Image: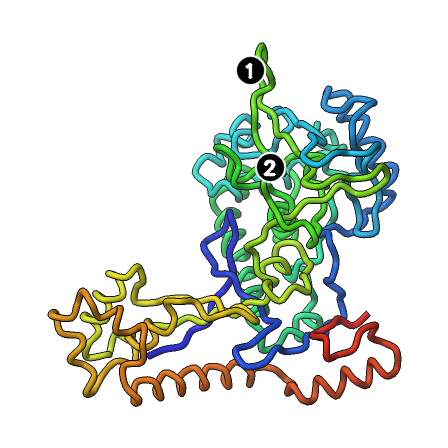
Amino acid sequence: MAILFTLSSSAFLPPLKPITPFSSLVKSRTLLVKRSIFISSSLQQSTEPAVSLQTFWKWLGDQGVVLKKSPARPGVVPEGLGLIAERDIAKNEVVLEIPKKLWINPDAVAASDIGSVCSGLKPWVSVALFLIREKLKEDSTWRPYLDILPESTNSTIYWSEEELAELQGSQLLRTTLGAKEFLQREFLKVEEEVLVPHKELFPSPVTLDDFMWAFGILRSRAFSRLRGQNLVLIPLADLINHSPDITTEDYAYEIKGGGLFSRDILFSLRSPISVKAGEQVLIQYDLNKSNAELALDYGFIERKSARNVYTLTLQISESDPFFGDKLDIAETNGLGETAEFDIVLGSALPPAMLPYLRLVALGGADAFLLESIFRNTIWGHLEMPISRANEELICRVVQDACKSALSGYHTTIEEQQCFLHKLYARGYLKENPHTGFRMKS
C-alpha cells in the first residue's frame, strides 16, 4: 500500500486535486506567514489607480458598454479595485452586461494576428500569449483594460522563497512548487514552438515572468462554466470581488442573447444580494474550492472550517499478490488503482474511503473475500469492519500518514501554540489563538 499526496485543481490546467495545508488528519496546524492572505480580492493596487480607472471607464463608454445611469462602476476599495454600487441594487438585479466583442477568449486569439500560430496550443496558453503581446504593445486597443490589471496577485506562485519557506510541510507548498515547475515547462515549450520561430509576431522579448503574470491573471480573473465558454476574461466584470458571506453561486452571471432584434451575445452579471448605494457589489467565487485552491488561485483564504481540506491519496500496490482482483473490485465501484479522498475539518470521512482502505489492506485469512463468488457483494462487506487485523492495519497506515505529514513542519503544534500565545499577549494578534490559525499582521 502507498500513501501519496497530490496537487490542486483548475479549470484550465491539468487536473490537480483540491487540497489545503491548514488542517491535518489529527489536529489543525497554525499557519504563520508574513504575507496576510485573509482578504476578499486577488488584486493588488496598481500605480495611480484612480486615473487608470477613469481612462478605463471612458473606454468602456466609447465601446457602448456602459451608460451614465449604470448601476455600478469601478472604484478603489480596501482590497484593491472593485465594483461600487451607484445606487441601491436589488437582489438578482442585472449590474452590468458586456458584449462578446470585449471578451478575451480563444476566439479573440484566433481572430488576432497571432491566431494562426496559436491554433495548436492549449486554450489558456494561447490567451496568455495574447495578453502578453497586447501588454507589450504601446498602441494596443486593449491598453485601458491592461493598465488596470495588477502586476501580480497574492497567489502563492508569486511568493518569495522566504515566504514559501513558511509553508514548509504543507500540501500548499507542494502545490505551489508543482505549479511553478509546470509553468516553466510550458514556457520552454511555447518558447521553442512559437516565440522563437515567430519573432516577427513577438518583437518584444517574452520572459518567464511575463508568462507567470498572464497565468496569474487568468487564474484569478477568468470566468468559466459559461455556456460554450470555459475560459474567458471579461473587462469590468472581472473587477467583482468575493464575499465569504454569500453562500450561493446561483444566477450570479450568465450568457444570453442581446435581444429580439440583436445577434449579439452578452455576459450578464447579477447581484446575488441587495446592495446599498456606495457599497461593493460582491459574489461568491466558488463554494467548492478548498482554502488551498483559493490561496493558489486568488491569494486569499477563508476562516470557514469547510474550506480546510487535506487530500489523502491511496493506492493499490502493483506488487500486491491480489492486485488484479482488488483493481477489478475498485473499478466496479467507481474507483481505480489510485483513489483520492478529501478530508474536511469537522466533517465525516468520505463514504468510500474506509471501504477502499479495507480493500487495499485485505489479505491473509480475509483474502477469501476476493474470490469471484463475492465479487458482487464484497463492497457491502467492506463498508463494515472485516476483521480485527484488517482494521488495525488501516489504522496504522492512517496514523503513519499523519505522522509523516506532521513531520514535514519545522515546528510542532505545541511550539506554535506557545508562540501564538506570546504574540497574543503582546498584542500582535487580534484574536485568541484557541479560535484557530491566524495570520501575522
Q: Quadrant of residue 424?
A: bottom right
Gap between marks 2 and 1 measured at Cα? 22 Å
Give the quarter of the figure containing the C terminus. bottom right
Q: Position of residue 103 (x, y in %)?
A: 61, 30
Q: Residue at x 70, y 36 (%)?
A: 91
Q: Is residue 40 toward the left or the right of residue 430 in the image? A: left
Local crowd at mark 1 within 10 Å, few (<14), some, or many (≥20)?
few
Q: Residue at x 51, y 47 (%)?
A: 12
Relative vertical location of residue 329 with respect to residue 49 in this rendering, above or below: below
Tell me which amino acid carries mark 2. Tyr
Label at residue 263: 1
Q: Quadrant of residue 55?
A: top right
Q: Residue at x 66, y 40 (%)?
A: 204
Label at residue 51: none
**Which residue is labeled 2 in the image?**
251
Q: Position of residue 16 (x, y in %)?
A: 47, 59
Query: 178 or 235: nearer the eye?
Result: 235
Q: Is residue 243 toward the left or the right of residue 279 in the image? A: left
Query: 368 or 161: nearer the eye?
Result: 368
Q: Is residue 155 toward the left or the right of residue 327 in the image? A: right
**Reading the chain from its start, which is encountered first: label 2 or label 1?**
2
Relative vertical location of residue 136 with respect to residue 153 in this rendering, above or below: above
Q: Is residue 426 toward the left or the right of residue 119 in the image? A: right
